Image: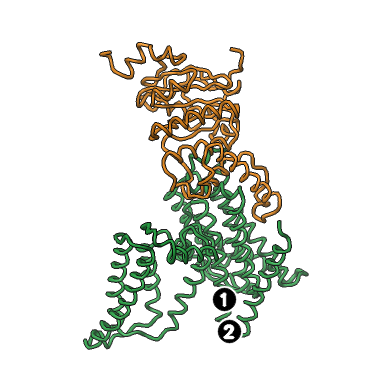
Chain colours: A orange, B green
């Protein structure tokens, strides 16, 4: 592969007391990949995301983003480097409107100082207006423009998930981590979502790593997949290979198969 | 930006402040004037605490400490240097406000930086403790008057400046909420983990809010010192912190106008009750029984009645009117009982009971505060009107 490596996990490990939640996981993601991270419940997928985004610091091993080591950095620093995520258990800013949620996502590109904001001076006004315009564009991409002024807590579930993606996109990341973006969606919504994710990759040039339980969704969407089980990596490869890998079948369906 | 409107509103604000001063000095005696000034200070305190508690979602309950720091620093410096300096008294007062604000800023930073890593209850304990520490340190410092008052502070009584500070505090809060930067403060309130994942430096935002809120309290302290000319450590006891907190909670955490209006009403409520004639035991007993019943009925309507908004409002009004009638009848009946008829209670004694009772009622019927996170504006009134009149028919249970 000629494309540069964006994210590189080297023996990433985290222990909580005696429990090894993620054990020596290695994988690397190239620019423009649509990468899937799958595994049964409790396999350590979300923990893996938490390691990458700085919520946890790996006990052993390293994580590199575009060649720079990022383990141990605070989550907001990692977001500033260009990694942004969505949350499995939706974490929107509930009482803010849909548009405002996305504007907060633009905080990283925020340049005017506090004083300018407190005095409501032109720089702050113009920047806020510009961020709102950008946020609106993103909402259109994610098909949320019609509910821009609705309080995000009042959105239906599927739209809340899309809003999570819009908000993450607003930080202008190079690598987008999606934690179960299709959870709780009906088949139609899932199909739409898959299309949107592909669109984000193709038109916006983002690299995407996603966790998903729905096998059909992942197999159709992702080009490369890593499978975790009990914190360990058990397989890696294109969907066709993963589907027929005996270890993966065993992890998902039990030994009898 | 629309400069004419902006300059116009600044001028209007100053005119309003002088108007308040003019009305207060021509219509009220000196104690009434003092209440007008103190009310303005409480608006500043409540709105500045709202920046910390309401907008940024941190639970600070030691706001009087920063008020205290501002007052003592400004009072102390004024006491020493006022005679020797060439400035006009008003200008000197402004300088003292800046000094008080700066001192409170420093205090806010020192307390905030380590303790804002804590959450919820823990932060509350730290701020409460800090308030007490400041008070006790002053009580034991001879140079600051110790347990006696720091007195003979030069009197510079400018009611307009007090209210201008209140308006500036309100304006700054509102400006913050109108810009993208302010949304980050709200985001921290809503979800810290998600905010930091979006690149928001959570600790920085929290400390900023804390320092900003403290600064306004400090400036208010400087004004207080020069208005009262004598300040005591007990002027800034825990009760003051709690009263400010009550104003914010009652007005609706996060609502700037809610905090401001609650500050004025809660400040004047005890003063109003103090001036009321004594009530008989009979009418008091009747009032307590009826209020409990009415609150219970209102709660039932709120939770179990799924009708149109208009009907709901009708039921509210109906039960309150019914309550008033019931109170009159019950009061007359109780009046027949000699023990009740003879007893009498002055408003002065009852004011703390009524204060507490009001809080309990609001917490039962509207725990998010009277204004919740809304702002008082003409659009809000229009929306409420529409809701009751037209769109109420869609009947979404509120």
Q: Residue at x 57, y 33 (%)?
A: A79
Q: Is residue B241 visible?
A: no
Q: Quadrant of residue A2?
A: top right
Q: Quadrant of the N terminus of chain B?
A: bottom right
Q: Residue at x 44, y 17 (%)?
A: A24
Where is mark 2, residue-wise?
Answer: B28
Residue furthest toward the right?
Answer: B86
Let me know if marks 1 and 2 both belong to one chain. yes
Classify mark 1: helix, strand or loop: helix
Query: Label for residue B36?
Result: 1
| Rendered position, B17 above or below A162 | below
In space, the residues marked 1 and 2 are separated at their CA atoms by 9 Å
Residue at x 54%, y 32% (from the top left corner): A84
Residue B55 is situated, as x and y percent measured from the top left of the image, at 52, 54
Quadrant of the frame with the C terminus of chain B:
bottom left
Q: Disc 1, disc 2: CB below 8 Å?
A: yes
Report the chain holding disc 2.
B
At 34% from the left and 77% from the top, the residue drawn is B321
Quick one: B349 or A173, which is closer to the camera?
A173
Q: Is residue A80 something one can see in this rendering? A: yes
First in residue order: circle 1 vs circle 2: 2
B82 on left or right of B330: right
Query: Where is residue B316 drawn, in percent x and y?
Result: 35, 70
Chain letter of the residue carrying label 1? B
Picture coordinates of residue A254, whole percent (x, y): 28, 17
Residue found at the far left of this picture:
B337
Q: Residues within 10 Å of mark 2 (few under 14, many from 20)?
A: some
Q: Is residue B100 above or below residue B273?
A: above
Binning the other alpha carbons within 10 Å of mark 1 as few (below 14), some (14 to 19) or many (20 upward) gives many
The secondary element bearing badge 2 is classed as: loop
């Amino acid at each position: 592969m000629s494309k540069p490596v964006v994210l590189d996990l080297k023996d990433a490990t985290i222990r909580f007391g005696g429990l090894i939640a993620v054990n020596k996981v290695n994988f690397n993601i190239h620019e423009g990949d649509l990468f899937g991270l799958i595994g049964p419940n409790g396999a350590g997928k979300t923990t893996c995301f938490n390691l990458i985004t700085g919520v946890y610091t790996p006990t052993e091993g390293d994580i590199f983003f575009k060649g720079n080591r990022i383990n141990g950095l605070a989550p907001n620093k990692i977001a500033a480097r260009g990694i942004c995520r969505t949350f499995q258990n939706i974490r929107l800013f509930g009482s803010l409107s849909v548009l405002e949620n996305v504007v907060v996502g633009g905080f990283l590109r925020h340049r005017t100082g506090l004083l300018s904001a407190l005095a409501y001076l032109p720089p702050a006004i113009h920047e806020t207006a510009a961020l709102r315009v950008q946020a609106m564009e993103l909402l259109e991409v994610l098909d949320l423009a019609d509910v821009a002024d609705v309080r995000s807590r009042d959105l239906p579930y599927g739209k809340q998930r899309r809003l999570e993606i819009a908000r993450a996109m607003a930080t202008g990341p190079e690598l987008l981590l999606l934690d179960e973006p299709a959870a709780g969606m009906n088949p139609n919504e899932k199909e739409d979502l898959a299309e949107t994710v592909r669109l984000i990759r193709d038109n916006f040039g983002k690299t995407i790593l996603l966790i998903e339980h729905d096998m059909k969704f992942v197999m159709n969407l992702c080009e490369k997949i890593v499978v975790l089980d009990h914190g360990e990596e058990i397989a890696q490869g294109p969907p066709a290979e993963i589907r027929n890998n005996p270890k993966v079948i065993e992890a998902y369906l039990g030994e009898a198969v | 930006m629309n400069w004419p409107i902006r300059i116009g509103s600044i001028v209007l604000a100053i005119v309003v402040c002088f108007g308040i001063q003019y009305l207060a000095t021509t219509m009220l005696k000196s104690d009434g004037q003092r209440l007008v000034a103190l009310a303005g200070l409480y608006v500043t305190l409540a709105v500045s605490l709202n920046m910390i508690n309401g907008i940024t979602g941190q639970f600070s309950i030691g706001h009087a400490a920063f008020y205290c720091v501002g007052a003592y620093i400004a009072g102390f410096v004024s006491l020493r240097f006022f005679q020797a300096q060439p400035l006009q008294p008003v200008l000197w007062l402004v300088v003292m406000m800046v000094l008080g604000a700066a001192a409170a800023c420093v205090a806010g930073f020192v307390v905030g930086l380590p303790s804002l890593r804590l959450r919820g209850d823990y932060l509350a304990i730290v701020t409460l403790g800090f308030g007490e520490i400041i008070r006790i340190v002053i009580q034991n410092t001879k140079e600051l008057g110790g347990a006696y008052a720091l007195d003979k502070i030069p009197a510079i009584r400018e009611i307009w400046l007090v209210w201008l500070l209140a308006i500036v505090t309100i304006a700054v809060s509102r400006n913050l909420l109108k810009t993208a930067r302010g949304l980050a403060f709200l985001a921290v309130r809503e979800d810290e983990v998600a905010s930091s994942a979006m690149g928001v430096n959570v600790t920085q935002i929290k400390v900023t809010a804390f320092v900003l809120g403290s600064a306004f309290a400090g400036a208010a302290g400087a004004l207080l010192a020069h208005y009262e000319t004598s300040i005591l450590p007990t002027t800034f006891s825990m009760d003051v912190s709690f009263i400010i907190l009550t104003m914010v909670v009652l007005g609706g955490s996060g609502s700037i106008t809610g905090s401001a209006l609650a500050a004025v009403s809660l400040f004047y409520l005890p003063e109003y009750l103090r001036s009321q004639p004594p009530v008989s035991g009979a009418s008091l007993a009747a009032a307590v029984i009826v209020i409990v019943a009415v609150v219970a009925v209102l709660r039932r309507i709120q939770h179990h009645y799924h009708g149109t908004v208009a009907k709901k409002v009708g039921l509210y009004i109906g039960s309150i009117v019914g309550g008033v009638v019931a109170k009159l009848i019950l009061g007359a009946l109780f009046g027949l009982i000699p023990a009740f008829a003879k007893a009498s209670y002055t408003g002065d004694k009852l004011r703390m009971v009524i204060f507490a009772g009001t809080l309990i009622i609001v917490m039962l019927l509207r725990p998010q505060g009277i204004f919740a996170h809304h702002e008082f504006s003409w659009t809000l009134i229009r929306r409420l009107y529409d809701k009751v009149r037209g769109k109420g028919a869609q009947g979404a249970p509120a």
